Amino acid sequence: MSDSGEPRRIIFARHGQTEWNLAIRFQGKTNVQLTQTGRQQAEALAARLSSWPLEAVYTSPLDRALFTAEAVASRHNLSPVILPELQEIDFASWEGQSIPDLQTKHHEAYSLWRADPFFNPPHGAETWEHLHTRLTRAVKIILDGSFRRIAVISHGGIMRALYAVFCGLNPHKVWNMDVSNCAMSGVEMRYGRACLVFANDDLHIRAGEEGQKMPVWGDTYGVKL
């Protein structure tokens, strides 16, 4: 589809806080539930997006993302579209493991992963090649539609991978970008280009009700040609 004319704008957002976020554990594809705080964060994100003319919501099938997506979609009388391709990275035997414990017991493997996560995965975990392939499918599904205001709810690892797959950022460097619970990033497409316009905006979490009233896509945002 051509992206000339009115720009297509996509909000990428991470799910709310989970029990394993608090415990500092790898989650991956494990279906961990939101905490009460996480549910409140999802509602704050939904309130922030309620005034934005949202047309479609895509989500990972995992409960932590799906709950967040349903909160966002309900403000627009929409139902989220589940894309299995958006579920979090498979971390294999590291799922459920305490990160501080891994740092101590498997220091070398953890240090290699930390230095370049997509290219030094744990043994048996999902590779960058597989992740790139499935996210390319997800992007195609999302962009094949006619919607111009879209929300995509997923996970920390997936959002970083999407920065690389969708925006062409260096996959070796995107883990340097913070992705907070229920923070949102904006990508604008025009003339075939995907530009990261803003990232990790969580003012709706940090500023309470005042943050929820802030605009989503301010007049100063936009592709500079």
Image (cartoon, rainbow, N blue to C red):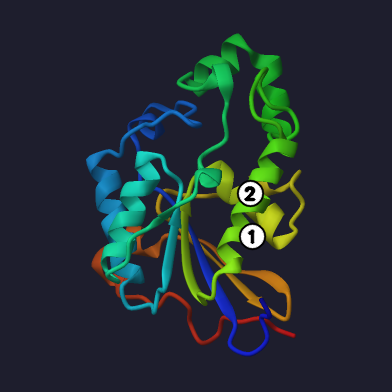
Q: Residue 65 location, x and y as percent?
A: 39, 46
Tell me the residue at 48%/31% (across/down): 29
Quick one: SS at disc 2? Answer: helix
Taking the spot 32% from the left edge, 78% from the top edge, the residue there is 51
Q: In which quarter of the image is residue 183?
A: bottom left
Q: Give percent across and percent down for residue 155.
A: 49, 45
Q: Is residue 141 above or below residue 188?
A: above
Vertical side of 65 occupied by 3: above or below: below
Q: Is residue 65 visible?
A: yes
Image position of 52 with respect to 32: above or below:
below
Q: What residue did someone put label 2 on?
A: 135
What mark, if any, has residue 172 been given in the picture?
none
| Quadrant of the snapshot with the N terminus | bottom right
Q: Which of 197 and 4 is in front in this view?
A: 4
Residue 83 horizontal side relative to residue 197, left or right: left
- Residue behind mark 1: 140
Q: Which of 100 and 119 is in front in this view?
A: 119
Furthest-top residue in view? Answer: 105
Residue positioned 58% across, 59% down in the render? 141
Q: Estimate how packed mark 1 is, as few (under 14), some (14 to 19) or many (20 or more) residues with alpha carbons within 10 Å.
A: few
Pointers 2 and 1 in contact (C-beta within 8 Å): no
Q: Is residue 176 visible?
A: no
Q: Of residues 105 and 157, which is closer to you in this image? A: 157
Name the amino acid, label 1: Lys
Nearer to the camera, 43 or 61:
61
Question: What is the number of callouts on the image?
Answer: 2
Foreground mark, 2 or 1, reads 1
Measured as percent of width and height from the top left, residue 105 is found at 59, 9
The mark nearer the N terminus, 2 or 1, is: 2
What is the x, y in percent for residue 69?
A: 36, 55
